Image (cartoon, rainbow, N blue to C red):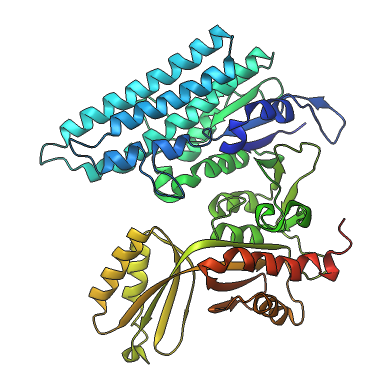
């Protein structure tokens, strides 16, 4: 009976009672009829809100410990924020273990030691960097990784204590490399950690963060747990990779279009998953998905709170039997940066510096378009970052007219959307509810169709496209 590698997201982890009953204590039956709690390894994220507190809020940008430390001065309260996050984590421990004094003491001691280590390290780093020979910026990536590691170690250690109290032979696999004097590569670290794991008789609970020479957050930032998950699956030759989320991968966000109007997606492919990731609504990070795709490991996305449902299976080569739109998705807070300069006509190298500046800004490029004298980038990033990029573009192109505008992007996605008249139907649906289309993109491969609209029109645009292309679509009528 081959094993699976499964990832549990932070929102699900915060509802640990449901995770315990719906996932960990729910026996799995293999193809040969064997039933067991084991043959499963779990990669766990930090509890909801903890990484936001340790780093910065993912959506609002509110400063966490890292952001406060990175901008540190004598008056910057990073230490107070660290203790506030510690208090939150201790409250989670109290809620989880209740009257189980032994488990709670173990969990509290483990956490308090990690927090004390981190505080000690940061205070000494501040002191060292007060000398001109040492620059704080040189160490910030390492600080960010160290702080992230605390959240994942906390949830993994707690989970092991909880499972042991329910008679499960759980094993804490700590990939954070805490207080170690050696460094391995990502592959080496994971291979070493799993070298003696007995999948048939123990349940590994693994930190979502892995410390390695490459510096996981330099490339993946907050997507590091998905890379850990993917690497474990490929290195240990898993039969299947499973992601447990707080919702189904559905035809749209049920909070926008209504729970009764959406359908769970039974199957799709990694191409569609990549398009979702580009919007920041990732089923899995594209680089993490690549390893699974190349090794032909099936990926399944399941709803933590509906364990009977088989979830969404993501294949290498899936294409829908009938061409159709499978998902309506999108994102708000899209910044369009438009560069207009009639001198760019016929100058093949004009945009190279522009591309470099956008890349260096660290923003996510959703798409871009250009014609003879105009280039427009559609970006996702904080306003402060966008303003800084605008200033650099103006310095590099003083003769150009450069402007920005806040928009939203709404997309139709599918493994095969070669439906005659689809663009006409989609545009008509938006027009019928008064949404003005500011730009539209559709590649020849026809797996995605992007509409740029006013940020204020985002919700009504999603609802209109879902109603026209899915709810009233002939291709979806057979789905009950």
The picture places residue 157, in percent across and down from the top left corner, at 53, 22
User: Which of 176/96 is in front?
Assistant: 96
The picture places residue 215, in percent across and down from the top left corner, at 39, 43
The picture places residue 110, in percent across and down from the top left corner, at 45, 17
For the point 68% across and 14% down, which residue is it? 166
Q: Is residue 362 above or below residue 89?
A: below
The picture places residue 138, in percent across and down from the top left corner, at 24, 44
Q: Is residue 383 above or below residue 368?
A: above
For the point 46% across and 87% down, which residue is it? 371
User: Which of 200/380 is in front?
Assistant: 380
User: Which of 279/186 is in front?
Assistant: 279
Q: Quadrant of the N terminus?
A: top right
For the point 35% across and 43% down, which residue is it? 63
Left or right for 25, reference 165: right
User: Which of 347/451 is in front?
Assistant: 451
Res 179 seen here? no
Q: Is residue 412 above or below residue 161?
A: below
For the point 86% across and 33% down, which residue is it? 32
Left or right for 295, reference 384: right
Res 260 seen here? yes
Please, which residue is most extreme toward the front here?
A: 434
Please, which residue is most extreme toward the top here?
A: 102
In terms of image quadrants, where is residue 349?
Answer: bottom left
Left or right for 371, reference 77: right
Q: Quadrant of the C terminus?
A: bottom right
Total labels: the figure holds 0
């Amino acid at each position: 009976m081959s094993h699976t590698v499964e990832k549990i997201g932070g929102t699900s982890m915060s509802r640990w009672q449901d995770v315990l009953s719906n996932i960990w204590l729910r026996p799995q039956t293999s193809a040969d009829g064997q039933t067991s709690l084991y043959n499963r390894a779990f990669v766990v994220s930090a509890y909801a809100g903890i990484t936001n507190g340790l780093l910065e809020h993912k959506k609002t940008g509110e400063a966490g410990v890292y952001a406060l430390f990175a901008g540190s001065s004598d008056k910057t309260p990073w230490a107070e924020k660290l203790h506030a996050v510690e208090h939150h984590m201790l409250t989670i421990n109290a809620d989880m273990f209740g009257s189980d004094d032994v488990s709670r003491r173990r969990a509290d001691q483990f956490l308090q030691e990690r927090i004390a280590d981190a505080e000690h390290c940061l205070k000494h780093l501040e002191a060292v960097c007060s000398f001109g020979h040492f620059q704080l910026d040189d160490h910030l990536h390492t600080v960010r990784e160290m702080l992230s590691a605390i959240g994942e170690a906390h949830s993994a250690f707690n989970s092991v204590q909880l499972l042991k109290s329910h008679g499960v032979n759980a094993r804490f696999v700590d990939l954070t490399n805490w207080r170690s004097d050696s460094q391995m590569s990502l592959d080496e670290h994971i291979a070493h950690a799993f070298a003696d794991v007995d999948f048939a008789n123990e349940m590994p609970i693994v930190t979502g963060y892995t410390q390695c020479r490459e510096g996981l957050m330099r490339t993946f930032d907050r997507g590091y747990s998905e890379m850990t998950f993917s690497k474990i699956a490929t290195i240990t030759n898993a039969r299947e990779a499973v992601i447990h989320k707080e919702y189904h991968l559905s035809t749209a966000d049920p909070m926008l279009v209504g729970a009764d109007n959406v359908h769970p997606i039974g199957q799709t492919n990694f191409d569609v998953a990549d398009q979702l990731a580009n919007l920041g609504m990732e089923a899995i990070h594209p680089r993490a998905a690549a390893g699974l795709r190349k090794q032909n490991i099936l990926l399944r996305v399941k709803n933590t709170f509906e364990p009977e449902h088989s979830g969404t299976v993501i294949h290498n080569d899936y294409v829908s039997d009938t061409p159709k739109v499978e998902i309506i998705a999108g994102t708000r807070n899209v910044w369009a940066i438009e560069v207009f300069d009639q001198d760019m006509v016929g100058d093949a190298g004009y945009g190279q510096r522009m591309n470099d500046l956008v890349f260096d800004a660290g923003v996510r490029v959703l798409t871009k378009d250009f014609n003879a004298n105009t280039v427009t980038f559609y970006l996702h990033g904080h306003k402060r970052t966008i303003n800084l990029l605008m200033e650099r573009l103006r310095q590099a192109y003083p003769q150009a007219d450069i402007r920005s505008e806040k928009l939203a992007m709404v997309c139709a996605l599918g493994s095969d959307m070669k439906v005659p008249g689809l663009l006409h139907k989609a545009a008509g649906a938006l027009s019928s509810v008064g949404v003005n289309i500011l730009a539209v993109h559709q590649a020849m491969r026809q797996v995605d169709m992007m509409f740029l609209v006013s940020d204020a029109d985002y919700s009504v645009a999603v609802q209109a496209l879902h109603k026209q292309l899915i709810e009233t679509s002939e291709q979806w009528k057979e789905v009950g």
